[in-house]
Image (spheres, helix red, strand yellow):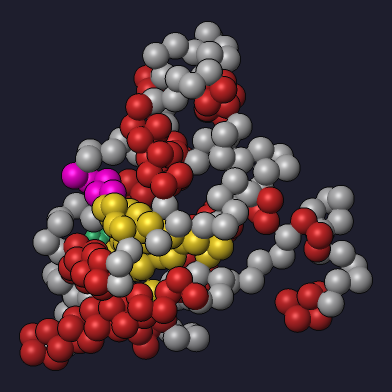
Amino acid sequence: MKVLIVLAHPERKSFNGGLVDVAIQQLEMAGHAIDVDDLYADQFDPVERAKHYAHHAFDDDYFYPLNEQRAHYQQNTLPLDVQRELARLEWADLVIFQFPLWWHAQPAILKGWFDRVLVYGGRYTSRMRYDQGYYRGKKAVLSVTTGSPDKAFQPFGRAGNMVHWLWPMHASLYYVGFDVLAPQVSYGIQGGGIRYQDEAALMEHLACCKAAWSSRLVGLSSERPIPFTGWDDWDEEGVLHLTSPLRWRLG
Ligand SMILES: Cc1cc2nc3c(=O)[nH]c(=O)nc-3n(C[C@H](O)[C@H](O)[C@H](O)COP(=O)(O)O)c2cc1C
C-alpha cells in the first residue's frame, strides 16, 4: 500500500511529528511505501487568491475561485504547488492527516490545503461527488491531538463533541469520494500551556498514545469506513428518501 502522510504542524520535533515517525516506522516495517507531505516545511500557502494564477482564465476583471480552478485544471495550468499535491494524492492508496486540534478544527494551513488542492472541475463536479467522488477506492484517516483530556470530550464535557469538530473534514473527504476511517484521537497532549498532569504521568500518557497509534496502524487498511449516505439514498433535492429505513436510524 502507498501511504501519504500530510503533516500540519509548525514543529517537526513536536508530538505530532512523533506520531508521524511512529507511522513511518510501523508502516515501513509492514512493507508499505510512505511519502511525508510536511506542509509547514514546504511553506505551503493555504490562502486561495488571484495571485496564484499567472493569468485569469475565466474573467479578467473578477476573481471567481471556482471558475478559475476549473479553467486552469482544464488548461493544465494549475499552480505548481497544487499540481504537486494532486500528484501525491494520485499516488496514494491511504492518506493520513496528522494535526493538532486548534480552535476546535484543523490548523489554517490544512484548511487552506482543502481550499486550494481539491479543485473544482478536476476533483469534484456536480455529479462527481460523494459516493461518485473522484477519490473512490482510496482511504483517508485523521490523526488528531488535543490539549484537553479525553474526559472533557465526553457527553456534557466542556471541550465539546469531537464528532462535531471533525465533521467538516470528514464530510469534505467523503465529498471527494474517500472512504473515511474512524479518526485516531490522542487526547491530553499537553506539550505547553495548560497542564492537567505531572511530568511523569504525562510522559507515560504520551508513550501510551504513540503505542495505541502504532498498534492500530497494523490493521488500518482492513478497517471498515464510516458509513455515509449516497446518491441512491437521496431524492432529487438531495434529501434522504421518505421511504429510506435510514430515517429511523438517523432521526
Ligand atoms: C492555536 C491553538 C489552538 C488550540 N485549540 C485547542 C482546542 O480547541 N482544543 C484543545 O483541546 N486543544 C487546543 N490546543 C492545544 C493543542 O491541541 C495541543 O497543544 C496539541 O494537540 C499538542 O500537540 P503538539 O505537542 O504536537 O503540538 C490549541 C493549541 C493552539 C496552539
Q: Position of residue 62 (x, y in %)?
A: 54, 15
**Number of dots carrying numbers:** 0
In the image, the segment drawn in magenta is: 37-41
As drawn, 17 above or below 133:
below
Given residues 178 and 207, the one toward you in this image is 178
Q: Quadrant of the N terminus?
A: bottom left
Residue 130 to residue 43: above or below: below
Q: Residue at x 35, y 35 (%)?
A: 84
Residue 107 visible in image: no
| Image quarter for ligand 1 | bottom left
Q: Please check the rendered image and state whether residue 220 is part of the magenta-colored stretch, yes or no.
A: no
Q: Quadrant of the C terminus?
A: bottom right
Figure check: 113 above or below 82: below
Seen from this angle, which residue lies furthest right?
243
The overriding secondary structure of the stretch rendered in magenta is loop
Percent x, y of residue 198: 11, 88
Residue 213 visible in the current orientation = yes
Q: Kindly give the residue lying farthest to the front in the view shown.
A: 31
Asked whether, in this view, residue 21 is left or right of residue 62, the answer is: left
Picture residue at 31% right of the left edge, 82% below the top: 215
Which residue extends farthest left?
199
Q: Where's residue 46, x and y in %? A: 35, 39
> Does 40 lie within the magenta span?
yes
Q: Quadrant of residue 44?
A: top left
- Image spot of residue 201 (x, y percent): 14, 91
Residue 100 placement, left or right of 116: left
Residue in the foreground of this view, choosing between 75 and 56: 75
Instruction: Say which residue appears at 39% left-offset and 33% top-offset.
Output: 82
The residue shown at (31%, 58%) is 33
Quarter where residue 205 is shown: bottom left
Write down the quadrant of residue 248 in the picture: bottom right
